[in-house]
């Protein structure tokens, strides 16, 4: 469903309409649980807000316009969207293939809920499309990937995986939360379903939690709505109204997020205490060429590994003054977190190590503050934590003192 308008125009006008009562510039908030019927069996399209709500419908049209699809299906949280996706498509005996590097909550959803119901999953390195091909079984029904993946920004060639799933008659879902349709177009690259945690960049103000599923397939969309109604996981009207306002500034915000993240990633790469920086906009990033090919920009998320132990990483987080220690991402404020002890803590040390999530890994959601101020805050936190020198330099100094 191609649009003649640029994404910046779609963010403000796409899928939006004036309300029928007062032509308010902003779509109204229908904060109601139920709707009065004109007569028995006669209504204006709404009966109960667990099923549908005009404000939620407005958000679904707006997201659909950005995704290039019919109206999306919106949920109370991002995990509610993922749960509906898998409950809609999988049953006992079915198999799913998922990215090895993945949001911890998605892994927990499979391990704690779906697997006990008889659904099996293979977590593979989807950065190599051949691994997806090798993991397919007769029971496989869906491939689910994150690109960029949380928290080390590993990329998957969406078009290459889509070619495989099409050939095998499988569905491909892409969690596009880190980039949104403003920076990456999974459906245009061949995916069947685009998954978003609207909590993040879509809202952009750390004011709501929510999720969405978008697809060109009307049967899939109706299935998602049925399961959503059954589970009772529809987005709330007020959160939908707030997200509608946040979406209007999405492209403008993302431009600054990307510019700031690039500057901070380059500064981090120059620091002797930093062993590695994960940011697709850096030439040193192993998949930089893929990022240039399938993304419009590198995004506002980055991670880096300190050349220091766990305690030093924690000391850095505890020493920041401008950055906020918080687990979410995509808002105006710069958020900093330690995945090993927060977002991926449930996975255990051995699993984290296998995923490349080290004890010294720190993730930053770069906000819209001055990048110079963010860098200054990180610099003083490094100094306060005693990691201004690399481990090798500290070892040399210690050896000199012994001599």
Image (spheres, grey):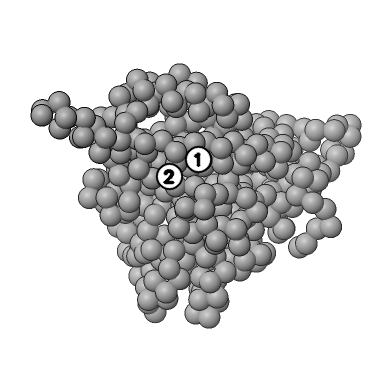
308 horizontally vs 289: left or right? left
Depth check: give the residue in front, 126 or 33: 126
- Residue 378 spot, x, y in % from top left: 44, 27
Task: Look at 65% across and 54% down and name the residue there.
Answer: 296
The residue located at (71%, 51%) in the rendering is 66
Dot 1, crowdedness within 10 Å: few (<14), some or many (≥20)?
Answer: many
**Is residue 46 in view from this perspective?**
no
Residue located beneath label 2 in the image: 277
**Residue 294 image position (x, y, % from top left):** 60, 61
**Helix, strand, or loop for circle 1?**
helix
Question: Which residue is the site of mark 1?
Answer: 265
| Between 379 and 164, the one nearer to me in the picture | 379
23, above or below 94, in the image:
above
Q: Marks 2 and 1, how far apart in space?
A: 7 Å
Q: Which mark is residue 12?
A: none
- 39 above or below 373? below
Q: Residue 43 vs residue 205: left or right?
A: right
Residue drawn at (62%, 39%), measured in percent from left and top? Answer: 259
Residue 207 position by quadrant: top right
* Label 2 CA crowd tier, 10 Å (few <14, some 14–19, many 20+): many
Q: Is residue 112 left or right of residue 55?
A: left
């Amino acid at each position: 469903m191609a649009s003649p308008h640029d994404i910046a125009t779609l963010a403000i006008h796409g899928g939006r309409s004036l309300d029928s009562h007062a032509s308010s510039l902003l779509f109204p908030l229908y904060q109601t649980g139920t709707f009065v019927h004109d007569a028995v069996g006669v209504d204006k399209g709404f009966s109960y807000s667990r099923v549908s709500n005009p404000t939620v419908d407005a958000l679904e049209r707006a997201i659909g316009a950005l995704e290039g699809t019919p109206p999306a299906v919106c949920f109370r949280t991002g995990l509610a969207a993922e749960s509906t996706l898998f409950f809609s498509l999988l049953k006992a005996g079915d198999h799913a293939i998922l990215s090895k590097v993945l949001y911890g909550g998605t892994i927990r959803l499979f391990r704690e809920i779906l697997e006990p119901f008889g659904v099996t999953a293979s977590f593979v390195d989807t950065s190599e499309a051949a691994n997806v091909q090798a993991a397919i079984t007769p029971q496989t029904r869906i491939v689910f990937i994150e690109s960029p993946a949380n928290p080390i920004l590993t990329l998957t060639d969406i078009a290459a995986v889509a070619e495989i799933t099409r050939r095998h008659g499988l569905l491909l879902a892409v969690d596009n939360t880190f980039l949104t349709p403003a920076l990456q177009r999974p459906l245009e690259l061949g995916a069947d379903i685009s998954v978003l945690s609207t909590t993040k960049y879509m809202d952009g103000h750390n004011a709501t939690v929510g999720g969405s599923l978008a697809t060109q397939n009307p049967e899939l969309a109706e299935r998602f709505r049925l399961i959503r109604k059954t589970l009772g996981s529809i987005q709330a009207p007020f959160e939908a109204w707030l997200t509608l306002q946040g979406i209007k500034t999405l492209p403008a915000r993302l431009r600054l997020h990307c510019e700031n993240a690039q500057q901070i990633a380059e500064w981090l790469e120059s620091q002797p205490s930093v062993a590695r920086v994960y940011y697709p906009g850096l030439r040193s990033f192993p998949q930089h060429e893929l990022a240039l090919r399938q993304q419009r920009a590198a995004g506002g998320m980055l991670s880096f590994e300190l050349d220091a132990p766990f305690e030093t990483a924690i000391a850095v987080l505890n020493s920041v003054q401008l950055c906020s220690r918080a687990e979410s991402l995509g808002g105006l404020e710069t958020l900093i977190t330690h995945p090993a002890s927060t977002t991926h803590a449930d996975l255990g040390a051995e699993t984290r190590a296998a995923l490349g999530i080290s004890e010294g890994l720190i993730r930053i959601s770069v906000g819209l503050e001055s990048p110079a101020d963010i860098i200054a805050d990180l610099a003083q936190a490094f100094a306060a934590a005693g990691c201004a020198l690399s481990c090798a330099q500290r070892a040399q100094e210690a050896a000199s003192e012994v001599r």
